[in-house]
Amino acid sequence: MTLRPTPQPRLLSIAPYVPGRSTAKPGVKATKLSSNESPLGASPRAIAAYKAAAEHLEVYPEGSSKILRTALGEVHGLDPERIICGNGSDDLLHLLAQAYLGDGDEAVMSQYGFSVYPIVTKAAGASIVMAPEADYSADVDALLDAVTERTRLVFLANPNNPTGTYIGAAELARLHAGLRPDILLVIDSAYAEYVTADDYDVGIDLVNRAENVVMVRTFSKMGLAAIRIGWMYGPAHLIDAINRIRGPFNVNLPAQLAGAEATRDVEFTAKLKSYNAQWRGWLARSLGSNSLRVIPSQANFVLVLFNDAETAQRAFEALLEVGLIVREVSGSYGIPNGLRISIGGEAAMRGVVAVLKDFGAAGAEA
Ligand SMILES: *Cc1c(COP(=O)(O)O)cnc(C)c1O
């Protein structure tokens, strides 16, 4: 018998994260609508800062991401001491799970919630409990019903990926009010910049008035996915705990500098938001019909439901045939009749509608 190192047995039950597909057939120009990336690129100010940082790659970054925390504090009106930045928000989700979950503990999430939550939960030795959704939207009563004495943490993506749905401020407050004070509520506001609903609460007020709420954010959906920056705002005791275990230089310097500029470039953020709102509405109206259902979205993608899994699969292939790569949500998300389509450039949006006309889409609005 050969001896060799073996990973913790609990890790072997984790299904690895499956990223959105990024290649089309050889010879076909690929347009990626599978990862919710910015169709307008990144803030020009962020790009300039990133390039300037290339002159001094020999120097360690400042480890607490102070430059970036200062910019976030100014623009969002937050105490920079209560912000932690991470190498993407995935980094922060792992750290939260590692800090607050252990063997025998449970974390609650919504049925169609973000597929990273089960990974970080199981990696920490805990188990994930799924609360059923009401028509593809998080259901506060079901989330509260899923809580047991073992629950230590609740994950809520708001708006959620891959459904695009959100719960309003009153429901979010009701969720928080129903949780024991020793349960951490993780509000993942990855798509906050794209929300247009009036009754949305990004989570800052809840963090300010409670000791058991943290808000997690990302730059990835705003044009900086390549350089991996996430951040979170939480109570001082949580910040203290996470700072003890995070990588000492977990955000690289070019990312810190680019992130700070992107934060201050509020005009670019506004431009992305209005572009997205316009084409999100257009795409939903052009696709929605008796045979195609578009779930109302507050994010930079829409979830489209077909009559059955086989039709969704054929639609996926038909889009791929012309180089339009969308996201299948059968496997890791359990929505076999759905496809998630990111809001992309105009030509891509028109291309999607043209292909899906054969699958019952209403057809392009002028
Ligand atoms: C994309 C996404 C993230 C995070 O992404 P990073 O690229 O790791 O910052 C987090 N939560 C949700 C719900 C997302 O969709």
Image (cartoon, rainbow, N blue to C red):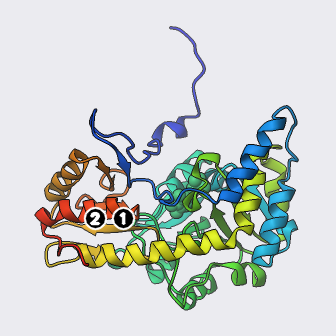
Q: Residues within 10 Å of mark 2 (few under 14, many from 20)?
A: some
Q: Could you say which quadrant of the image residue 193 lies in?
A: bottom right
**Residue 160 makes an appearance in the image:** yes
Labelled disc at residue 98: none
Q: Which corner quadrant of the image does residue 281 belong to? A: bottom left
Amino acid type at mark 2? Arg
Q: Which residue is mark 1?
A: 346
Q: Secondary structure at mark 2?
A: helix
The quarter in which the C terminus is drawn is bottom left
> Could you say which is closer to the camera, residue 152 or residue 66?
66
Residue furthest top as drawn: 1
Indicate left or right for 162 with 289 as reference: right
Q: CA distance from mark 2 to mark 1?
A: 6 Å
- Mark 2 CB lies closer than 8 A to ligand 1: no
Numbered mark located on residue 350 in the image: 2
- Expressed as whole percent of the image width and height from the top left, the position of residue 118 reads 50, 54
Question: What residue do we see at 16% from left, 52% from top?
Answer: 314
Seen from the viewer's position, the closer of residues 231 and 320 is: 320
Percent x, y of residue 70: 85, 65
Q: Name the quarter showing ligand 1.
A: bottom right
Q: In screen coordinates, is 301 left or right of 295? A: right
Q: Indicate yes or no: mark 1 CB to ligand 1 under 8 Å.
A: no
Compared across the picture, whether 304 is left or right of 315 comes to: right
Is residue 249 shown above or below 327? above
Query: Residue at point 31% right, 75% down?
Result: 284
Q: Are marks 2 and 1 in contact (CB under 8 Å)?
A: yes
Please provide percent x and percent y for residue 47. Answer: 68, 51
Q: Position of residue 8 (x, y in %)?
A: 59, 34
Q: Quadrant of residue 215?
A: bottom right
Identify the amino acid type marked 1.
Answer: Glu
- Answer above or below: position of 28 versus 7: below
